[in-house]
Amino acid sequence: MPWVEKLLTLITALAMVACSHSEGGNSVTEVSQDTVAAPDTITLAMVGDIMLGTTYPGTRIAPNDARDIFAGPDSLLHAADLACGNLEGVLADEGTPRKTPGAKGSFSFLMPTHLVARLKDAGFDFVGIANNHVFDFSEPGRQSTMRTLKDAGIAFSGNELCRGVVKEVRGVKVGLCQFGHSLGTQHLTDTALVHGVIDSLRNISDVVVVAFHGGCEGSAARHLPDETEWAWGENRGHLRLFAHDCIDWGADVVYGHGPHVVRAMEVYKGRFIAYSLGNFCTPSGMGVAGLTGYAPLVALRVLSTGEMVDGCIHGFIQKPNVGPLPDKSGAVVREIAALSRDDFPNNELDIAGDGRLVIKSRK
């Protein structure tokens, strides 16, 4: 019967984007209700990696129990309709590390659960957990992370238990999801999965935002290659193809992180893509020297139907044991603008010296 088939299709779509909020696996679609009429535009604040401090292998947490680490960008995060970032590590108070301690390239981040209050107080509405540190303390650590975020009222996505989530802001339904490349995440190289999650979100959202954790790492990885990237034995994606596919399949905004440095931005089919927003707030336990200390916040204005209107890159720079502070030199914006010109010579995105983002054909 046709109506039965339609009902089954709807149930399947809802299940695909369900977020599990219990260790038992009961799934619910997380939607924040708002009764105001939908506006013409909404503003998204997007940032890269966040690591609030770690207790493994020793305690490395910023002064004042990290209460001040978001003081610099606080007003920008709160001004946005939806603030999004990547949670680089595990929220748990204990755990057994999965990686070999002391081995080359072995880094594990165990953030005390009480530090989730720093995210909440800063105004974050959504964090992705599809990255190469979410499984640092195996399944118990991943479960603790999801449980802690749920209890704090912060939406999340990134694995088979939380494919995607819908947040309703000022009457606009925004679907969000994140993909990664490592154990414990939903993989960006699984094209059928990526397409399916986007399709499901598209069916129940006005705007679809896709985040990803991918690419090589470090200052040598500033430029975006037009090929698949490999690091530490992992396929970390052909990110140009991934981002374009996401938009072709129905995404409106795509932003990435993972290389620990910023990368180019572009406009594709009227939609915004940021290939890496680098580190944003990683003051204790991660390197923030040179380019790894560049910490942009992108405030992007989109129509309630998803098309980019305009935006601004707000540059911040990190110092050890201090959160992101305003970049008065303009170095962060200059770096992103130069990379965007070099890597996308025919880019439709114009980045002004003050960070303003506009589509060239509309100037």
Image (spheres, rainbow, N blue to C red):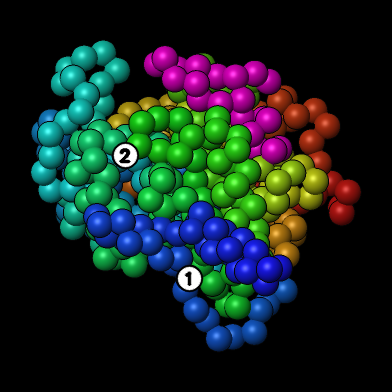
236 up-or-down from 169: above or below = above
Q: Secondary structure at mark 1?
A: loop
Residue located at (44% from left, 67% from top) = 30
Q: CA distance from mark 1 to mark 2?
A: 24 Å
Q: Earlier in the sequence, mark 1 or mark 2?
A: 1
Q: Is residue 232 left or right of residue 17?
A: left
Q: Is residue 295 visible?
A: no
Q: Which mark is residue 134?
A: 2
Q: Is residue 168 visible?
A: yes
- Type of amino acid under label 2: Val
Which span is picked out in magenta? 226-245
Mark 1 residue type = Val
| Image location (x, y in percent) of residue 362 | 87, 54
Is residue 251 found inside the magenta-colored segment of the image?
A: no
Residue 136 placement (x, y as % from top left) = 25, 33
Residue drawn 19% across the image and 44% down it: 140
Query: What residue is drawn where x is 13% and y is 39%?
Result: 95
Label 1 crowding class (10 Å Cα cut-off): few <14, some 14-19, many 20+? some
Front residue (pair 141, 74):
141
Q: Which mark is residue 31?
A: 1
Q: Is residue 283 left or right of residue 159?
A: left
**Place of residue 262 in the rendered image (x, y in percent of width and height, measured from the top left):** 54, 33
Give residue 310's quadrant in the image. Answer: bottom right
